[in-house]
Amino acid sequence: MRRLAPHLPRHYPYAAYLSKIRAADPHALIVALRPFNGTHADDIKAAVAAANDRKIVYVDTTGWLAPDDFNGSTHPNIQGHQVAAAKLTAVLKRLTGWSTGPIGTPKLAPQGLAEATCSDTPLTLTYQGPVRLGVSGKVQIHAANGTVVDTISLADLTSYQRSVGQAQTDFGQLHTWMYQAVVVDGPTVKIYPHRRLEPGQVYSVTVDPGFVVGDRGTNEWRFRTRHDPKTDERLSVGPGKDFCTVQAAVDFVGEGHQTTIDVAPGLYRELVWVPPTKPGLTIRGAGAGKTVIGYPNNNLLNGDSAMGNVPPEQSYCQRRVIPIHAGMLRTATPPILRRSLLARVSPLTSWVAVSSSSPAASARAPLALPVPVSFSSAFCFFLSLTRPP
């Protein structure tokens, strides 16, 4: 870290940072939050005061989060983010006069029994305007006989844990991954069940009042799942296809089978795990920038602190989370990191072929360069299966 000149105050770097933001937008409201653990709080407060700008506001977050709202001591966990978002929303409403207004009755998807949906479907609620999650309440999926087959509770951190495929730890137990069970994007709330539902069945969904702030809840949500394909020789992923997720298609393929999985254009927000017993897979996208598979699988989601409450037998990374061929890790990865990855992914005996819809680019070979790799601090990693432009 560069040392400050002796005559410069400690808050100078943050003051300079605020000046850059103000220069970029002379009229914006700038809200400077105290870091939740209090680090550099005095420097940030001093920099805001030195700016002498009524549209630069310091927000004291003292007491916003409790000890169990953190992954470790610095970064909020999922529950902490929900609590902080609710408090920050109240601050912004006070500072700007902003009002969210009535959110209306959500449009539910999938909905109705007329058309079947894929058995790995997310559940979507779309409102009239931007919404936010509550801090309690749950969503439950019920089988036709009333049995609860899945529950996602905002107040239960285990609701944000799931397995991916049949990935196992070095202890031979199913690996437990942290994942984002509920994602809010403006007026849309997407709920991702913990597992694929049974094919060819009718389900109902109940949503508690307050699960979404301002929503009175629902118990009139029904849909049915379509039957599985008759063969795994060629599968499709996307709206109206065999499956909604790449992982469900991978799971459906028999061990040792030669299979092509065609993935329609779109963003597939998921972790993908391919076992070494399925080396004959070709995952074919719609072209560069059209089919993207990715997930925020990082240290804050699946690192040591985030997984602190998961037994080691369920969270310890296996030596090989996804088959990776050395050819996938060329110029896209720095040499030192590349050597580290190759040292930790062993044995390298199989790979996933990802091809474009273009005949010239559809050869069954390791992924073309570059191949982005996202990984946690313990080097549990997945591939973002996208072909370079």
Image: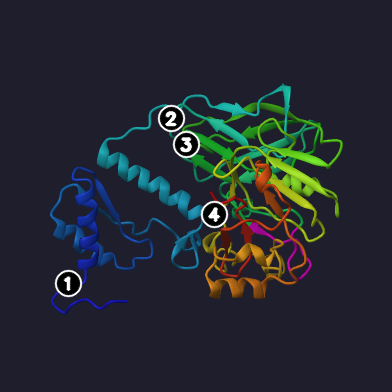
Find the distance from the CA under tag 3 to the CA under tag 4.
25 Å
Find the distance from the CA under tag 1 to the CA under tag 2.
44 Å
Nearer to us of marks 3 and 1 is 1
Residue type indicated by callout 3: Val
Nearer to us of marks 2 and 3 is 2
Q: Which residue is mark 4?
A: 296
Going from N to C along the chain, the mark reached first, 3 or 4, is: 3
> What residue lies at 71% left-to-right and 70% top-to-bottom?
319
Quadrant location of the N terminus in the rendered image: bottom left
- Residues shaded magenta: 167-177
- Residue 175 bears which disc, if any? none
> What residue lies at 58% left-to-right and 71% top-to-bottom?
338
Q: Which residue is mark 2?
A: 129
Q: Is residue 280 left or right of residue 335?
A: right
Q: Which residue is mark 3?
A: 213
Going from N to C along the chain, the mark reached first, 3 or 1, is: 1
Q: Where residue 133 sits in the image (x, y, percent)?
A: 49, 41
Find the distance from the CA under tag 2 to the CA under tag 4.
25 Å
Residue type indicated by callout 2: Gly
- Residue 9 bears which disc, if any? 1
Q: Where residue 379 sits in the image (x, y, percent)?
A: 61, 68
Nearer to us of marks 3 and 4 is 4
Vertical relation: 308 (above or below) 138: below
**Does 210 appear in magenta?**
no
Q: Residue furthest top?
A: 114
Residue type indicated by callout 1: Pro
Q: For this rendering, which residue is in front, 73 or 347?
A: 347
